Image (cartoon, rainbow, N blue to C red):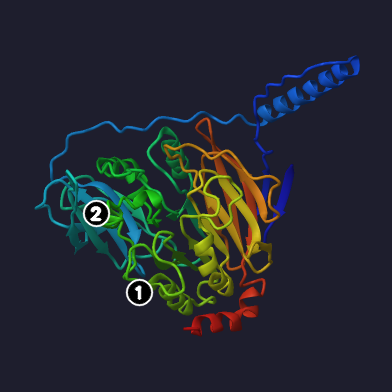
Amino acid sequence: MLMIIDSPELEVHCCRAADPTFAEVSVVFTVHTQMELKLLLITVLMMVSLSATAAADYIRPQPRKTFHLPWHSKPSSYPQQVHISLAGEQHMRVTWITDDNSAPSIVEYGTSPGRYDSVAEGETTSYSYLLYSSGKIHHTVIGPLEHNSVYYYRCGGQGPQFQLRTPPAQLPITFAVAGDLGQTGWTKSTLDHIDQCKYNVHLLPGDLSYADYIQHRWDSFGRLVQPLASARPWMVTQGNHEVESIPLLKDGFLSYNSRWKMPFEESGSNSNLYYSFEVAGVHIIMLGSYADYDEYSEQYGWLKEDLSKVDRERTPWLIVLFHVPWYNSNTAHQGEGADMMASMEPLLYAASADLVLAGHVHAYERSKRVYNKRLDPCGSVHITIGDGGNKEGLAPKYINPQPIWSEFREASFGHGELQIVNSTHAFWSWHRNDDDEPVKSDDIWITSLTSSGCVDQKRNELRNKLMTP
């Protein structure tokens, strides 16, 4: 179906793909009469025709094996697994690992290649996990940095030069979105497609490495994503595959918290599992599906405090990420987000959250604006995008009939792109991985709840929620 969409600033022509569901059908009938034979032939012809048509539209590629990077010997002080993340206004955190425990935690940086006008020194950590011992993990914050500018930097005083671009100060801004990445051939395909996107920040709603207790897989994941994660900030939250707790031996999230430090302290949080940040005209809240979230929890109290500081004139867009989806019509992980939804959805609804991004379900789904499972023009758009390429494969089965709040769903690997055009309009698109080519399969213009009047309409409701003990 051809759609022509006009916005105040863009005109987009796109084709929406048909539902790619298809199946091989085997039928056994017992024929008693000539009439039954005719009905049988008609039925079989119709089924073959429908199956052929669907298959012609889209044939889902097969799963791929774990992706392995070639191993190269490097000096023990050589920086590896480099990634960056936002760390407060005009600052960036650079994280890397060395095998040499005496390597310095310094970052030299500047705006010209090979000329480093500034230097910053950071902190280090390390951890042990059963028989595994990590390298020295360095976290160094650099800045203040100019907006929308290219910087060249070097970690630890040696090794290669890296290049990053800072986000813009104002809209427009573009986010790449992909959850449940893992380390398969499809992961590599997703990352290659994201690399083709002109984006400013990567958002990842949980399940990064799929190390699953095998700690060297965290190292291989760091090497896999380094080309992208060293060039644009990656803002992540935890999923179930980051837990890795061992009763009486190891607390949860040890590897994740050590390696992927996010700006939780900068946003007034006591936990790396939930935090917020602002970029351009967007306030983004990263919540923890695996941290306590009831109304008496620290996370809930922090969320109320954070929402009380949001200025919708300065940041007209409010986006929320967490791992386990609240709106999910796939048969996988049904009901797992119900308790968190019961606790937090009323608060986010009162705050007029524009968009909620989740992962966990290995498929794609986009909702209409919804609240409390009912269509609501002041509710959030919920998007499940746990289809980055993980080793567990896709979740192909959906509940039928499709719920009224569900707008589009498809079980394919891929990534999303969110362009916040201005204070009133954003453009979302989802790009399916198809034989190593990114295919745009779903898109929609989203109008901000600030411009629709919902923020003003619910201002008193939000105030009451925030003041309730």
- Residue at image position (27%, 41%) is 214
On screen, residue 386 above or below 74: below
Q: For numbered disc 2, what is the local secondary structure? A: loop
Q: Which residue is drawn at 35% across and 67% down?
A: 90
Which is nearer the eye, 408 or 251? 251
Mark 2 or mark 1, whichever is nearer to me: 2
- The residue identified by callout 2 is 250
Given the image, on which type of amino acid does mark 1 rest? Gly
Q: Give the CA separation, mark 2 to mark 1.
A: 26 Å
Which of the 4 quarters of the picture holds residue 273?
Answer: bottom left
> Looking at the picture, how far across and down is residue 74, in whole percent?
16, 38
**Residue 112 found in image quarter:** bottom left
Residue 221 position in % (x across, y down): 32, 42
In the figure, is residue 8 to the left or right of 250?
right
Q: Give the farthest residue toward the right.
A: 35
Q: Which residue is drawn at 68% across and 44% down?
A: 400
Circle 1 residues within 10 Å: few <14, some 14–19, many ≥20? some
- Is 121 displayed left or right of 36 in the figure? left
From where the camera sits, is residue 66 visible? yes
> Which residue in the structure is indicated by mark 1?
268
